[in-house]
Amino acid sequence: MTETEPGEPTPQTCLRVAREAAALAAAADDHALSAVCRSSSRNEARLEEVMHAVHREAVEAEGHAARAEQWAADPEMPDSALRHCARGAVDYAVRAQEAAGVEVTAAALRTELERRLTAQEHAELESELRRREAEQEAAERAATGMDSDNRHLARMNAYFAESAVPALGWSAGHVRVMEAAETGRLYWRDGQARQAAAHGVWSGGRRVHRERTQDLRAAGFLTAVAAADGAQVLKPTPMGQVALEFARLYPAGLYDSDTAAYEARYARVAKRYKRMDDKKAAARRLPALEYGAVRLYRRPVTLAEQEVRAEREAAEQWEDEGGYCPGVPTPAPAVEDTARCPCCGLHKVTVAGVLTPHKATRAAVEDCPGSGLRPGTETPRPAAEPRTEDAPAAAAEPAPAPAADELPWPPGVRLVSLMSTRYRDWWGLECGRCVPGVSAPLPGKWDDKGDARIAAYAHYDEAHRPADDLLTEQEIAEVERWPLSDAQRTVLHRAEHAELREYDDGFWALDCVPDRWDVNKRVARARVTGLWAAGLLDVHLDSSGRRLVKSPTARRVVRLLWRAKRQGVAEAAAKDAKLTPLPKRSNGYPLLSEGRYFKGEQRPADDAAPAEPAALPTSTETAPPTAAAVRAEQPLLRRLFAPRAARKQRPAHDLHTVIRRPQRVLTAEERERVRDTAALNFQGALIMGIIDPVPNASPMPEEAGAWVREHVWPEHLQQIERKYPHGFARWSMCERGTCWNCLSGRCDICVHRQKGGPDVDRNQDWVTDHRGRNVARLIPRPGGEPCVWWCRCACPKDGPAPARPAAKAKPAPAAPPTAPALAPAPAATPVRAPEESAVQAALW
């Protein structure tokens, strides 16, 4: 038997309790048997059922007591076995007495198995537990050289490495290349990678595998830094450093050879719908490390590194404070004349709000604003208070300052931990209010949580505080002057996020359902005209007609109404508000359905002029033909692609100045590239006009642009770029070439002749991160200059349409033979090659 722990019953106590519990269960069984013997015919069945139930419990209690006696005689059995038998016997005895209906006295035996410890025993147990934990911690620290927190980080890193290393598709050779780059002596020169013998000597040295180095650099694990004599020093990127640490933690995830690694990557990327060349190209590329793995990795710090860091920080503080003497309060500058340097982290004296020059204690000396730059705003450190000897203990101890994590953060902005370096921990910010439903990362990173909090409040004050601040009395009064209903607010929303247009049959919101394709809804005429008359909607005239957009007044009013609804100040009205029209718009909206037009708006030629005296024209003009005449003269293909009504045809006198751009002539190499394009991508390139694009003049040479697309662009952009003969994302609207109709020789139905104008882009683009998510909006031309695409064909885009090319004459069918005759066996006829289409004839 093992030694009994404090607070646990002895083996003798367990054996005695088991025997007493078995005796009590047997007594309850006898009582139930006697009750059955004295029973009558009325309760005989019930008492017999109770007798059997009590007997089962008594048998179990006696069995536990017998096993307790048997195990007590066995010296190899632990004390826990006796305690288990004793507790089981007591439980069965209690159930037997409850089933028999007698007094439950066996429950008192449980207290003997649960002895309470005294205060001295508790203290001894706690001391022994702490001693064991200290011994175990000392042993683990001696074995690993790290404390418990860093050992936990090491275990978590090893756990993450088990799933991250096999996904890298590396062999042991890739690890050797990364280790050579980690030394800082790996360089690339004259198409060969070498490991220099010493730092700064970029010539000679041991050769490093060229293909592995190129693959690691293309995947983003290595980066190149220009050195002397045209050499490029290859260093690991943050992602490459994390991948190397994972590979060291889990070497079993590496493949035996480059061939095995290539086969594993091929099995992962091979899909049925992919071409063989695409599969092989994807297998040759090394996949990047997952972004989550990079964020989750934390480098553990050993005890020796912690001591070195503590000594360095103590030395920095000593030098910063000018030395420290025990018992003498350290002097500090006044509150209003101090500020914290965002680089060094030190409180320094300021003169007129500018930091005075001081010695930088961190590595980034050139970024330190101690040379005279104005630091970021921060609450200065208060001056030190002299200590008094007679003050009470409670007053002598200052209130503890709240930790950095306990201070409040602005609503919606949270602190995230970034990958740490050897000497610093870095932090970033994410905002959940900039993009709905997404925690968008904010630019910048900080090694101090106080600086990160200052940046968070600066972002909140600029972007979100106006929405959270309570409305003033003037703003509430303005909200009350615009009691718009939900329907009116919906019209304003569609005018901004959808396309609100006016046609002959009324007002329509085009494509107004975000989760369904091409859903248009009619909008009430009185609602739109009322908002226009009040100055909340403006009318823009373009080649397709009238488009209604929100006015600057509407944008401000909608913002105020949104803030009022959010703060519970005002809700939407039940009925449409009767808004007061502006003086300039008091005459009413000129509806197209009534044949009325705005001042300066072009009236279609087939619309009758209003009944009013008009001046005689000075010159005779030929009116365009009617819609019926146009449809009668046009062939079937022209009727399919031409506008539906002749009134939409541009008048002959309304000519546009077309900027004629040069038309590209494809070379033999470009023709072969176009021929090899997949059919679906070929049709898309025809529609977008990038079969023969013409690039604009650029200060960046083509070689530099190709390098940027290969090494800087993310994989999702490179994937779609390779599908098109001349690329996809590199072409803007003004660089597009000839439309598909003109390429096929049908200049009479040119795309821009049908539209009556060029294609105009929205003059904006999006900046994406490495995952393809939109993070910022880019406006290339802040002045609002449009970027247009005119078909580069020399055919006219206005005026009379060119003649349709004549159709090919079909050969006359051969006359049938006059009389059937036996013909000899026909000779083998040569196979006729298929005729080339019009598009191919125009291209080649």
Image: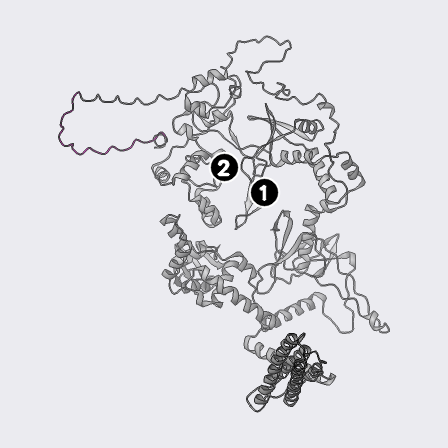
Q: In the image, what residue occupies the spot 68% across and 34% down? A: 487
The residue segment tinted magenta is 818-838
* Quarter placement of the C terminus: top left
Under mark 2, the amino acid is Ser
Residue 703, how many percent across, how many down?
43, 44
Q: Is residue 179 left or right of residue 490?
A: left
| Magenta span main SS | loop
Q: In the image, what residue occupies the spot 44% across and 67% down? A: 252
Residue 817, how many percent across, how many down?
18, 22
Q: In terms of secondary structure, where does tag 2 sit?
A: loop
Q: Which residue is mark 1?
A: 777
Residue 728, how many percent across, how many down?
46, 41
Q: Residue furthest right?
A: 390
Q: Is residue 624 left or right of residue 31?
A: left
Under mark 1, the amino acid is Arg
Report crowding for label 1: few under 14, some 14 to 19, many 20 or more residues within 10 A (C-alpha).
few
Q: Do labels 1 and 2 touch, CB within 8 Å?
A: no
Tell me, yes or no, whether the highlighted magenta stretch contains residue 824: yes
Q: In the image, what residue occupies the spot 42% across and 58% down? A: 213
Tell me, yes or no, whether the highlighted magenta stretch contains residue 835: yes
Q: Nearer the viewer, residue 225 or 521?
A: 521
Residue 375 seen from this side = no
Q: Which residue is mark 2?
A: 732
- N-terminal of the pair, mark 1 or mark 2, is 2
Residue 517 seen from this side = yes
Which of the 4 image quadrants contains residue 496? top right
Q: Is residue 789 left or right of residue 411?
A: left
* Quarter placement of the N terminus: bottom right
Q: Is residue 261 left or right of residue 514?
A: left
Distance between the alpha carbons at the discs numbered 1 and 2: 16 Å
